[in-house]
Image: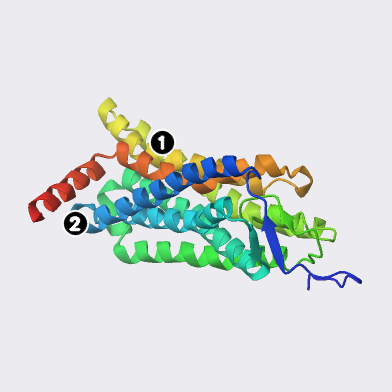
Amino acid sequence: MWMIPVQNQSWVSEFILLGFSGDPTTNSILFIVFLLIYLSSVLGNGLIIMLICLDTQLHTPMYFFLCILALLDMCYVTTTMPQMLVHLVAHSQTISFAGCWLQMYVFGSLATTESTFFVVMAYDRYVAICHPLRYSVILNWGLCVWLAAGTWICGFFFSLFHTFFTMNLPYCGPNRVNHYFCESPAVRSLACMDTHLIEMVDLVLSVFLVVTPISLIVASYIGIVKAILKIKSTQGRCKAFSTCASHLTVVTLFYGPSTYIYMKPNSSYSPERDKQISLFYNAFTALLNPVVYSLRNKDMKRAFFKVMGRSRVDC
């Protein structure tokens, strides 16, 4: 549908991911740094999942959603960083066309899932603060499971369109992607045809999948702020605001960079700048989320010391 015949040209069968540097010494340093970031992200999010599963007092809708977010972050960072680490120390930085297609699809699916999942988490905070007495009735376990499953289905469904439009373009050379993974704007810039129409379709999808969730989150927090302002005690207001602070922090860290990457025209594509921004919302968000949700959360700290105490007793 989107492919056109190109005479006297051969189709690209693989791409070369240029990464961050061609200097071996620099790559060795980057390997150590990114390896630490990756391991910290996986261990931090894995710890959150373990604590929520082991501590029955954390079996509530809020922590169920936090567990899903941690799982998303683990999958999200694992989609790109292991391959980047291999490419930093290997002589070859190639990825097959099919591998690039798969990486773009899985990464886009998880990113879209996380984007819509933040709306679910905002709704959870809205119900908890605006309707505290009916919280467990409104957010029953059946609804929680359906909301979580719906975000995953939505993410993997819409990402299929996004990936199809990009990878079904004709790629007849060059095949050097100035990025550390197969992200849509970087790959699309290599297409040997006018991509204006694809950009417009991509922009429509991005508006729907980014602006709509942001609008719903803002609407939820407008209701939350109105409810908090009605609380008479200062201590009550601070406690209510603190329950939303972590969510607002991770939402800002995620939507800021991703909005810039996916909602700007291809004409303003800047490889070096976009690589750095992509690294921030891909790697650093997954690294910071456990820190944001753990350091300010007394329940998570209590669960951690409880599990550690139980481990000492077992030993």
Distance between the Cα atoms at labels 2 and 1?
A: 32 Å
- Is residue 217 visible in this depiction of the protein? no
Extreme residue toward the left, this view:
313
Mark 2, mark 1: which one is toward the viewer?
2
Instruction: Please report whichever mark, 2 or 1, sits nearer to the chain's N-terminal start.
Output: 2
* Left or right of 100, for residue 307: left
Quarter of the rendering containing residue 294: top left
- The kind of residue on which mark 2 rests is Thr
Q: Quadrant of residue 103?
A: bottom right
Among all residues in the image, which is located at the extreme right?
Answer: 7
Could you tell me if the residues under marks 2 and 1 are in contact, i.e. CB atoms within 8 Å?
no
Q: Quadrant of residue 83?
A: bottom right
- The foreground one among 45 and 315 is 315
150 horizontally vs 45: left or right:
right
The residue at the point 24 percent across, 56 percent down is: 59
Q: Residues within 10 Å of mark 1 (few under 14, many from 20)?
A: few
From the image, tell me which residue sits under label 2: 56
Q: Secondary structure at mark 1?
A: helix
List x then y, in percent, for residue 95: 64, 63
How many numbered circles are shown?
A: 2
Outermost top residue: 234
Q: Is residue 143 left or right of residue 177?
A: left
Q: Is residue 143 left or right of residue 25?
A: left
Question: Residue drawn at (80%, 67%), measured in percent from left and top?
Answer: 170
Instruction: Tell me the quadrant of the picture where the N terminus can be found.
Output: bottom right
Amino acid under label 1?
Lys
Task: Please name the residue that numbered disc 1 is placed on.
Answer: 226
Position of residue 212 measured from the top left corner of the image (x, y, whole percent): 57, 51
Q: Is residue 145 above or below residue 115?
A: below
Look at 37% across and 46% down and name the residue there: 125
Quarter the C terminus occupies: bottom left
- Image x and y of residue 60, in percent: 26, 55
